[in-house]
Image (cartoon, rainbow, N blue to C red):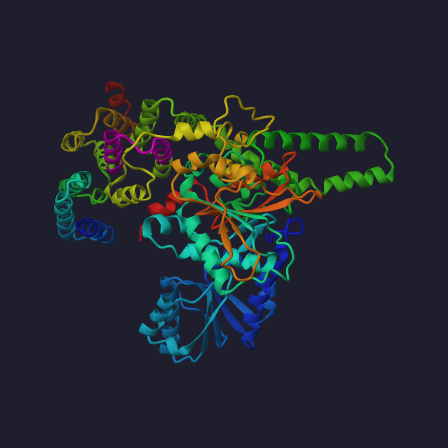
Amino acid sequence: LLLKESWELEMNLLANKGSPLQGPRIRLIEQAQKLFSETKEQNFESKAAEEHAKLLRLQHELEVSTKQAIFVGSSISDTIRTCIVLGNHRAATRVRAEFKVSDKRWYWLKAFALATVRDWDSLEKF
Amino acid sequence: MAQIPNLDNSPINLSSIREQSQKELLNILKNVRGKKCLVIDPKLGGSLSLLIQTSLLKENGAELRHLSAEPIQTECSKVMYLIRSQLNLMKFISSHIQNDLSKGLQKEYFVYFVPRRTVVCEKVFEEEKVHHLITFGEYPLYIMPLDEDVLSCELDHTFRECLIDGDTSSLWHVGKAIHKLEFSFGVIPNVRAKGKGSAKIVDILNSLQAEEPVNSSDMGTPEINTLILIDREVDMVTPMCFQLTYEGLLDEIVQVNNGAVEVDASVIGTQQDGKKIKIPLNSSDKLYKEIRDLHFEEVVQVLRERATSMQKDYADVKSTSQSVSELKDFVKKLNSLPEIARHVSLAQHLQTFTCKPSFHSRLDIEQTILELQNYDLCFEYIEEMIHKQEPIIHVFRLLVLLSVSNSGLPKKSFDYLRREILHSYGFEHMPTLYNLEKAGLVKRQESKSNWLMISKALQLIPSESEAANPNDISYIFSGYAPLSIRLVQHAIRSGWRSIEEILKLLPGPHLDLKRGGSTSGSAIDRVPSFQSNLDRVTDGHRALVLVVFVGGVTFAEIAALRFLSSQDGMGYDFIIGTTKIINGNTVLESIISTN
């Protein structure tokens, strides 16, 4: 029953997708996370929900600091890419550290992102 | 070229089924006198285009519209709706009616449900307070021929509904459809079923027979000898593999819908920029009938030969003076030129995909996964796809293949890959992962994989396969014989008994029963020990087998069955029944889309 409830919350979340109200959405996710964490089997889901909430907060911050509303709703990888494309390497490294992105993925992302902005010099260097 | 397939060469009289459906539809139209506006559910519109010419509908005084949220603009005072029983469609209709009411228009409304009315749908109208304005009816279209040997119920989401949503109404639909066929062709005496859904359909079929018996005594011998029901759940490996027959490839790359593909005009060579052209694909096209089930490489060869011989004929005509009759032959051949040109252009279009290195590496990795040789290599391949953010549907296809053949993924890589997917594609894919797990498509490994045992016992991967000179169905996937078709092969050869041990390793129960010809319907005996060799009819008559895939069938599997029946010494013809023609992408898409 608990399980069902938490999945319903998760589905709810999808329904609320794209709503500009950041506050309630994060709250909802955290609620789901709590429910997930109450059973042992849902360890993975609980962690994912935690990370999701964290990501939304971080993206919100990024939007405020860059004054561009392009972050919320994208994935972690996309966020990193966007940061690099914007030349904001410090933010990219921070996202990478926050979510413990593996080296492998990091290199792909960086290579793709640098290639899109044709920053061949940086690509050469790294 | 008509989109409605020609059914004259069908092993049983499928035209009669289509004619019956046509007649029922026209009767419905005639019941409403005078001019009327017929509003069709767009999804049904596609199916109806295979059933009846639109001109015929217009002759009966119908003005045709597609159903959408937009209000209907029409002069007619009678509005007929032809719809599937889906709640969102009911909302559209009631909003149309309310729109008319607000304008003070008085109209008559008729709602025909396909294939039957449901209480829930009528409830919607009651809630919207328009129920009393509507006359309700049913159009019992349960199954329709897609080609001379293919029947479909056109149910899009059977697989998802049965495995994830727990909604088994589509099984009833399939049971009803088979029962309807029995009214035309007699009670099918032998039934073999594998999988949960299939077993349930057998139950439904039996109870339908008890309620509404087909009177077999005044029909003579049943035309269909055996019914084989295979649940898609039993073999999820085959649909995940990329199809390599001409028709399969067309479906994978440009998508075959209602027996036709739609491509950019530039593909066919006419210079109309940006315009889409619809090309019907069915056995009425003789060249297509010949090449649709061949391996794509062979198709290219056949087309090349045709073109060359044409060229040679042309040169002959130019160089020597020929008799009139020879010229006549030549002109006759010229008639097939548009067909050749059409398929050359299509094949060329497909080749732009098949010559890419990524296409070959994908085929290689599929083969490696199936051989269960090198787990780490497969794992890394998928990991890299995720990291490169390749289309998620491709990732899932390989992931399902890997998980199913390994009976799940080891916990560590299961969690790791799930995390990487969420990170790369976004957390909104959580429900998708959950659905995949619930359907058992991507899950945690709990027991040792028995895929190798199955594959060995059924010879799914032959040691040496010649794609150019096929003796076995494995040539269709260049060295993998589809599991589902191997099961069918065994079922007709010697029944389930000989492979009982293997069947137990696959999901769902299996049944093997004989049904009595008596009208009581309850005379159904299980024949556990009966080594039922299909009685090969001695007078050279070929036995007919109806193979129903519950949850969808791929073109490659259809090709494999056609190939089987064309083999020497095979005394069987196949009719294929399905809930829908699918491929790996469409199955997964129905799981991914959440609403």
Residue placed at 83% from the left, 37% from the top? Answer: B326
Q: Which of B271 and B500 is in front in this view?
A: B500
Q: Is residue B364 above or below residue B8?
A: above
List x then y, in percent, for residue B521.
51, 59
Residue placed at 76% from the left, 42% from the top? Answer: B332
Q: How many marks?
A: 0
Q: Is residue B148 above or below residue A88?
A: below
- Describe residue B344's horizontal placement relative to residue B336 as left or right: left
* B206 magenta-colored: no
* B413 magenta-colored: yes
List x then y, in percent, for residue B187.
56, 56
Magenta-tinted stretch:
B398-422
List x then y, in percent, for residue B478.
51, 28
List x then y, in percent, for residue A72.
20, 44
Quadrant of the image occupied by residue B319? top right
Q: Is residue A81 above or below residue B464?
A: below
Chief SS of the magenta region: helix
Q: In this view, does B229 lie above or below A109?
A: below
As drawn, the residue found furthest toward the top would be: A125
Residue placed at 57% from the left, 73% from the top? Answer: B30
Q: Is residue B378 among the parts visible in the rendering? A: yes
Q: Which of B315 and B531 is in front in this view?
A: B531
Q: Is residue A117 among the parts visible in the rendering? A: no
Q: Nearer the viewer, residue A8 or B284?
A: A8
Quadrant of the image occupied by residue B170? bottom left
- Describe residue B516's horizontal placement relative to residue B372 as left or right: right
